[in-house]
Image (cartoon, rainbow, N blue to C red):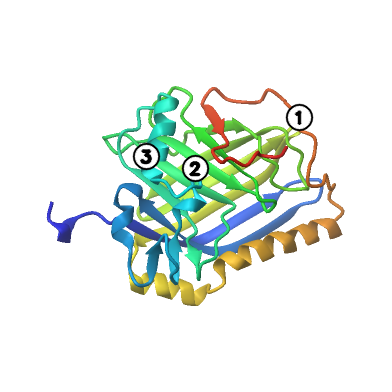
Amino acid sequence: MNPLHAPPAAFLMVGRVMHERLRPTPHRFVYPLFCVRLNLARLSTLNRWWFGINRWSVLGLSTRDYGACDGSDLEQWMRQRLADADIPAYGEIWLQTMPRVFGYAFNPVSFWFCHDRDGQLRALLAEVRNTFGDRHSYLLTADDGGPIGSDTRLQCRKTLHVSPFCKVEGRYEFRVRQHAGHASVAIDYFDAEGLLIRTAIGAKMAPLTGQRALHALVRQPLLTVSVVVRIHWQALRLLFKKVPFYGKHPHVIQTGLVAPSARSSTPSNKETRP
């Protein structure tokens, strides 16, 4: 293939995240964000002066932040997870995540898009982190094991404690959509009483270039730091609204609400606290 006509190894995604709690008191916020979507087979080609792989840079990515968290090859790690789950996703694997900004990163959720050789999405891995230092991965497929389309609902039981304002119960429902240079992931959270929280991450996609990356950085120079600040600010607002507070270690409630499409794992050596 002529390198001048090769498809991009990475995309810059500029958009926003929306989060809405429906009860007991309505609470909604929208924040701007930018992130990257990287072809893991071509990760080593992305080293630039402005984007570093496993080194300090203005923007960058550390493989120790994902997968086994030991710096090992991310594509190989994901392919082993797919093989263990008997998922026929032998095509490209893309990681969508917020990059490290001036060496710092915190990602509430990163997505691994796993395709078959025909380019169809066959699995989604949602790698979730909380502010307590815990993480958990949810490996999701369509109920029939086929390709994942824009109307496919991917479900899994909630396992990781994310917010002290929610119990560890119920399930998540994911929907993935991509068209005409725009991509989104919607996440609905259902507790024992029904739909509680809606979250949506939507962004425009364009090939990752230095000019685009630096322009995004100028507009949001404190991107990753602001994520943590905003999480705590919204928590304070919920306290003011007197939303029930369950603390750092709420009791895990096994509701049995889990779809056959969901496979979950905690790939790090650190135990996930309930």
Q: Secondary structure at mark 2?
A: loop
In space, the residues marked 1 and 2 are separated at their CA atoms by 27 Å
- Residue 43 in the image, given as x and y percentages of width and height: 33, 54
Which residue reaches farthest bottom? Answer: 218
Find out whether the residues at labels 2 and 3 contact each other: C-beta distance under 8 Å.
no
Is tag 3's residue or tag 1's residue first in the polypeptide sequence? Answer: 3
In space, the residues marked 2 and 3 are separated at their CA atoms by 11 Å
Crowding at dot 3, Cα within 10 Å, few <14 / some 14-19 / many 20+, comes out as few
The residue sitting at 26% across, 35% down in the picture is 118
Does 164 sit above or below residue 191? below
Image mark for residue 68: 2
Where is residue 264, by image quadrant? top right
Residue type marked 3: Gln
The residue sitting at 79% across, 61% down in the picture is 237
- Residue 109 in the image, given as x and y percentages of width and height: 56, 49
The residue that mark 3 highlights is: 76
In space, the residues marked 3 and 1 are separated at their CA atoms by 34 Å
- Labels 3, 1: front one: 3
The residue that mark 1 highlights is: 253
- Residue 105 in the image, given as x and y percentages of width and height: 55, 61
Q: Left or right: where does residue 4 sit relative to residue 260?
A: left
Is tag 1's residue or tag 2's residue first in the polypeptide sequence? Answer: 2
Q: Left or right: where does residue 113 sit relative to residue 130?
A: left
Where is residue 145, by image quadrant? top left
Crowding at dot 2, Cα within 10 Å, few <14 / some 14-19 / many 20+, comes out as some
Front in this rendered view, residue 43 or 167? 43
Q: Secondary structure at mark 3?
A: helix
Residue type marked 2: Ala
The residue sitting at 62% across, 61% down in the picture is 30
Does 153 sit above or below residue 44? above
